[in-house]
Amino acid sequence: MTDSVQQQVFEIIAKQAKLDVGSIKPESTLKDLGVASLEVIETIFDIEEHFDITLPEQENADFNAETVQSLVDAVQKSLDEKAAAGNGNDA
């Protein structure tokens, strides 16, 4: 995982939550950061649009209660899958 993905996710969360990006820690939850439920949805949409990905609807996924790191991991996984799919289409 690249730090830039984490940094970009943190910046999107900071913008949405109107926080200093330095106050966001991987172990924080969006709820801990004061992001309201509706803002969580908007944050996820912002992240999906920024990275041009669709985060998979995982069973029991709750980005409001899970850590920011789990969100970063989900973004990285989607980016990896997108890259792999792109490579597979070249054949």
Image (cartoon, grey):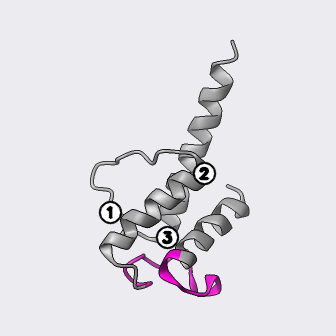
Residue 65 makes an appearance in the image: no
Measure how far apart labels 1 and 3 are at the Cα level: 11 Å
**Residue 32 lies in the magenta-colored region:** yes
- Name the residue furthest top: 91
Mark 3 burial class by Cα count in 10 Å: few <14, some 14-19, many 20+: many
Looking at the image, residue 10 sits to the left or right of residue 56; the answer is: right
Quickly name the residue at label 3: 68
**Residue 3 lies in the magenta-colored region:** no
Q: Position of residue 82 (x, y in %)?
A: 59, 36
- Foreground: disc 2 or disc 3: 2
Instruction: Give the structural element (helix, strand or loop) at label 1.
Output: loop
Q: Position of residue 52 (x, y in %)?
A: 57, 46
Measure how far apart labels 2 and 1 are at the Cα level: 20 Å
Closer to the camera, 70 or 12? 12
Mark 2 burial class by Cα count in 10 Å: few <14, some 14-19, many 20+: some
Instruction: Give the structural element (helix, strand or loop) at label 2.
Output: helix
Q: Residue at (61%, 41%) from the top-left corner? A: 80
Quickly name the residue at label 1: 62
Is tag 1's residue or tag 3's residue first in the polypeptide sequence?
Answer: 1
Q: What type is the residue that disc 2 sits on?
A: Phe
Give, as a single range, the part of the protein colored magenta: 16-33
Residue 9 sits in quarter:
bottom right
Q: Position of residue 13 (x, y in %)?
A: 53, 73
Quickly name the residue at label 2: 51
Q: Look at the image and tell me in which quarter the N terminus lies.
A: bottom right
Q: Residue at (31%, 73%) from the top-left corner? A: 37
Residue 10 sits in quarter:
bottom right
Q: Position of residue 84 (x, y in %)?
A: 63, 31
Q: Look at the image and tell me in which quarter the C terminus lies.
A: top right
Q: Residue at (32%, 63%) from the top-left corner? A: 62
